[in-house]
């Protein structure tokens, strides 16, 4: 045995657990994946470790179930040592079926027809985590087969979004790079009578498909052969002809009712310009690309499930290698559309201004709002590979984000709807405020105060009406005794009631009058409440902040005391990340 005792114990414990889960037979692949997941320190040595793991698994598998159980108890299997763990925890992703270490290739295939969103983050993170878990490869493949939808701007936005998430594909390619190859496979399908050119009107195709009846075009392969020559030599007009797969027109699975493989689209494609008019559909391009790209595991969202049969049927007829398909649920939030198409409509209809509107779930907007990529990764991994349709609460993401930013954010003062508070007898002085109660690296700041402050109207009225003593944080205790009004202003007048810190005294933030800086905070909420557009989805809160805030760069994360975490958006504006 070459491995040290600790490692051996880890392997045994994981192996035994796996065996007990699967009726006494542990699977080497599953055990390796699990070991890599919880012992990051062993990954570098994996090659040398594999024979050891195989040997231990073999020994475990000859034991009886009861012996396996006893042995696991003996070595304290519950306490598998989790050394060297990093934040990139794979804890929530189960092992991939049929995955071999060193031989896994996954792909993320976005269409460059919009800006990436948190749904893409989910898919891309899962693809990447599995590639890394098995020491494999991740391919980013732009699924760019509709010249009317794709734009260079969107390829760039997707690249930037992935970079922000910390995802580094091993290969980047476009489906359009392979357009000639895809044409060739299309022609091949026609030749072997697995596809035909259909010239029926779209309405006819639609009706017959719904009824499960085939059309005349399907019958004679020779006619299709002629027509396909015409089609690929660009002699058909747009909408005059499509190429359809010869599936099964009466199949219960409507995806198999002779779906479209190619259509004629005239448009200026960002990569191929006007060179190409015959474009493959996703249904045709995806299986071929996956197969030729060496994808071992194609992970897709659940709505594709019905199309799995078609995916394999196409590969079958072309005699191409079949990747393993597996599904996970599409990420959805209440009241927030997670779809490029829907977001694009919101922009086109002027409901939101741009792709980085803080109400949107685009990566750009989430970054602008103050979500960190680490929090998004943790969130995605916490969802795991479930197929559940339930929408995860956005609060979960917020609390993961809060945990990361809370120790790093300066705590500063912002006063919403400010009123003046005059404190009788208060002397002018410089006060030193701590930027964080327990992160001393965030230092202190100095503020000049006199006897005039701003506090929020809501606080002032409440304390005046109830006669409550309160504390201006880091200063002193006061009590409001009078409200003076002139034609324009109300001034709240207070007396000092001592310096003593008392648990029961409410503590509020303030801004010194001399130091006040007009400031706005944007609050973004769900775009929809039920089916209805939420008119309060974007609120702008006016107030004053300490002038220090104006010196902070865009992107700085802060916490406004009693308000929430914010990201600085410009000199006068911050966006509320979450409370
Ligand atoms: P959209 O409506 O945003 O265009 P799409 O599925 O057509 O959605 P693609 O760019 O084709 O978007 O998707 C690329 C990959 O991202 C696909 O594998 C898809 O399953 C995945 N994906 C897209 N949206 C989500 C989501 N909301 N949750 C999980 N995965 C998603
Ligand atoms: Mg799509």
Image (tube, rainbow, N blue to C red):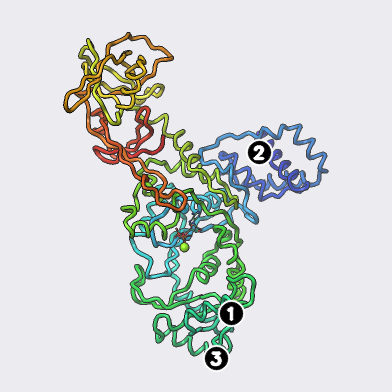
| Mark closest to the chain's N terminus, 1 or 3 | 3
The residue nearer to you, when weighing 82 against 438, is 438
Determine the residue positioned at 33% across, 24% down. 459
Label disc, if present, on residue 3 of the rendered structure: 2
Determine the residue positioned at 44% across, 48% down. 529
Neighbourhood count class around disc 1 (C-alpha, 10 Å): few under 14, some 14–19, many 20 upward: many
Q: Can residue 163 be seen in this view?
A: no
The answer as to whether callout 2 falls within 8 Å of ligand 1 is no
Determine the residue positioned at 50% across, 53% down. 123
| Mark closest to the chain's N terminus, 1 or 2 | 2
| Mark closest to the chain's N terminus, 3 or 2 | 2
Observer-side mark, 1 or 2, equals: 1
Q: Residue at label 1?
A: 246
Q: Where is residue 519 in the image (x, y as percent from the top left)?
A: 25, 34
Label disc, if present, on residue 414 of the rendered structure: none
Query: Which element type, helix, strand or loop, lies under badge 1?
Result: loop
The residue nearer to you, when weighing 454 against 264, is 454
Q: Residue at label 3?
A: 222
Q: Identify the image quadrant of residue 538.
A: top left
Identify the image quadrant of the C terminus.
Answer: top left
């Amino acid at each position: 045995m070459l491995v040290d005792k600790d490692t051996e114990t880890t392997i045994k414990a994981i192996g035994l657990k796996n065996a007990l889960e699967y009726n006494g037979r542990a699977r080497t692949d599953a055990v390796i994946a699990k070991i890599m997941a919880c012992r990051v320190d062993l990954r570098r040595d994996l090659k040398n470790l594999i024979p050891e793991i195989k040997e231990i698994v073999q020994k475990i598998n000859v034991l009886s179930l009861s012996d396996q159980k006893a042995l696991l108890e003996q070595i304290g299997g519950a306490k598998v040592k989790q050394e060297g763990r990093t934040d990139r925890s794979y804890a929530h992703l189960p092992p991939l079926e049929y995955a071999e270490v060193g031989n896994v290739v996954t792909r993320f295939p976005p269409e460059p027809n919009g800006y990436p969103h948190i749904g893409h983050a989910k898919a891309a993170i899962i693809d990447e985590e599995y590639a890394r878990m098995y020491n494999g490869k991740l391919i980013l493949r732009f699924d760019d087969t509709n010249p009317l939808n794709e734009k260079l701007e969107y390829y760039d936005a997707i690249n930037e979004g992935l970079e922000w998430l910390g995802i580094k594909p091993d290969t980047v390619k476009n489906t359009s790079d392979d357009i000639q190859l895809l044409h060739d496979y299309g022609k091949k399908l026609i030749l072997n009578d697995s596809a035909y050119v259909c010239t029926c009107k779209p309405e006819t195709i639609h009706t017959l498909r719904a009824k499960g009846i085939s059309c005349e075009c399907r019958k004679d392969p020779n006619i299709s052969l002629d027509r396909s020559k015409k089609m690929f030599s660009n002699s058909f007009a747009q909408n005059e002809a499509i190429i359809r797969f010869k599936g099964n027109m009466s199949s219960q699975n409507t995806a198999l009712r002779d779906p479209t493989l190619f259509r004629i689209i005239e448009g200026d494609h960002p990569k191929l310009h006007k060179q190409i008019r015959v474009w493959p559909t996703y249904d045709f391009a995806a299986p071929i690309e996956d197969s030729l790209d060496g994808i071992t595991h194609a992970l897709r969202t659940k709505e594709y499930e019905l199309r799995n049969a078609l995916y394999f049927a196409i590969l079958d007829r072309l005699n191409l290698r079949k990747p393993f398909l597996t599904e996970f649920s599409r990420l959805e939030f209440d009241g927030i559309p997670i779809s490029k198409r829907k977001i694009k409509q919101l922009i086109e209809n002027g409901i939101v201004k741009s792709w980085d509107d803080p109400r949107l779930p685009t990566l750009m907007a989430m970054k602008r709002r103050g979500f960190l990529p680490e929090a998004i990764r943790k969130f995605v991994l916490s969802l795991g590979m479930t197929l559940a349709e339930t929408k995860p609460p956005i609060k979960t993401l917020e609390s993961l984000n809060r945990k990361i930013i809370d120790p790093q954010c300066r705590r500063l003062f912002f006063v919403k709807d400010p009123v003046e508070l005059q404190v009788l007898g208060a002397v002018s002085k410089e006060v030193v405020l701590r930027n964080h109660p327990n992160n001393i690296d965030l230092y202190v700041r100095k503020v000049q105060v006199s006897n005039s402050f701003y506090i929020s109207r809501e606080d002032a009225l409440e304390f005046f009406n109830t006669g409550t003593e309160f504390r201006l944080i880091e200063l002193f205790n006061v009590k409001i005794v009078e409200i003076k009004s002139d034609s324009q202003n109300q001034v709240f007048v207070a007396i000092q009631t001592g310096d003593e810190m008392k648990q029961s005294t409410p503590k509020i933030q303030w801004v010194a009058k001399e130091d006040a800086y007009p400031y706005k905070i944007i609050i973004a909420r769900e775009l929809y409440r039920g089916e209805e557009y939420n008119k309060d989805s974007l609120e702008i809160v006016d107030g004053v902040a300490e002038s220090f805030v104006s010196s902070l760069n865009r992107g700085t994360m802060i916490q406004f005391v009693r308000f929430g975490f914010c990201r600085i958006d410009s000199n006068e504006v911050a966006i509320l990340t979450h409370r």
